Image: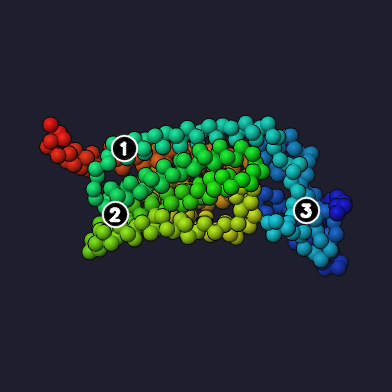
Amino acid sequence: MDLGLFPRPKLGVSFCSGVFCNRTFDMYICWPDGFPGTTVNVSCPWYLPWQSRVRDRYAFRYCSDNGSWLLDLVSQGPWADSSQCAEDDVVRHSIQRKLRFVYTAGYTLSLISLVAFLLSHRKLRCTRNYIHVNLFSSFILRAISVLLKDSFTDSPDSESVPCRAAQLLLHYSVASSWYWLLVEGIFLYTLLVLSVFSPTKSYRLYLMIGWGMAEGIMCLCLCRCWRQNSNMGFWWILRAPLLLTKSTLILIPMLGVHEIVLALVTDEMAEGTLRYLKLSVELFFGSVQGFLVAVLYCFINREVSGQQVNSFSPSEIT
């Protein structure tokens, strides 16, 4: 299709036929009204950190003859070409390398601390500590899946089975870790308010919530090694429960404050500097969550330390 460039309509211009494409904002650019059968061009957004290098470039949309914006066959949303406004590959790759270093170091620290705790506290026997162990296991699985994912997805267009399996494991482990944090809150609530429930029966329910609910929401429509979503409607199947779960983290301010703030900033809204700020905060706190949980729940927890000492028999102590 040969798309001819058409300048932005001036204010006050009327469309005699009554057919035109409505002005809209797609969380990236404000698009003006468009004449049917023409391409609408808009200058690159002013807020981009690299705006000085793209100030003379444009983004494009095509207004169809029927007065509707041309749809993208993959995403089923309005088609737009903003490639001229994209940042330079050198700058983008530099930022991506820095972010990757930060979260790799964080997940490695979390993995080491969690494994060290599980190996040194193998004799803890109570429902609360069983829940802790499952929570730690979900964070260990999350750290391993991130490290595996990076090793399989160096090629952006990889469609291999190991690549998809690693990405599926990542989605599952992330969801499970949030649900086990939710279980921690539910368990504390039952101790304080609903003490009539049997700990054994409740633990089975906790297992279903922590590991089962994450599995139940993995029906996503993904492409390119299942790293990118082609339909945002399906993505909310995974996103909505996680946003609701994150709101319960008031019990642990170090883990929950940034999630409460960033929950209002979706991926579609974050562009430019805001996007990099959101990614930096999420990747840093997400990667060290396992380490923080191990410290808060175990290494400085007197109850856990005391129970570990009491679990030794006299013969083992002597």
Tell me if residue 85 comes above or below residue 200 in the rendering: above
Please state which amino acid type lies under the numbered disc 2: Leu
- Specify few, some or many for label 3: CA neighbours under 10 Å numbering under 14, 14-19, or 20 or more: many
Q: Nearer the viewer, residue 259 or 107?
A: 107
The quarter in which the N terminus is drawn is bottom right
For disc 2, the neighbor class at 10 Å (few under 14, some 14 to 19, many from 20) is some
Residue occupying the point 39% across, 38% down: 291
* Residue 77, horizontal then vertical, whole percent: 69, 58
How many C-alpha atoms fall within 10 Å of the one at disc 1: few (<14), some, or many (≥20)? few
Whether residue 206 is visible here, answered yes or no, is yes
Q: Nearer the viewer, residue 43 or 197?
A: 197
Q: Is residue 187 above or below residue 270?
A: below
Q: Which residue has dot 1 on it? A: 119
45 to 317, vertically: above or below: below
Colour scheme of the picture: rainbow
Rendered location of residue 304, percent (x, y): 24, 42
- Earlier in the chain: of badge 3 and badge 2, it is 3
Disc number for residue 61: 3
Q: Which mark is residue 188?
A: 2
**In the figure, 282 relative to 102: above or below?**
below
Amino acid identity at mark 1: Leu
Q: Is residue 167 visible?
A: no
Residue 218 numbered mark, or none? none
Distance from the alpha carbon under mark 2 to that under mark 1: 25 Å
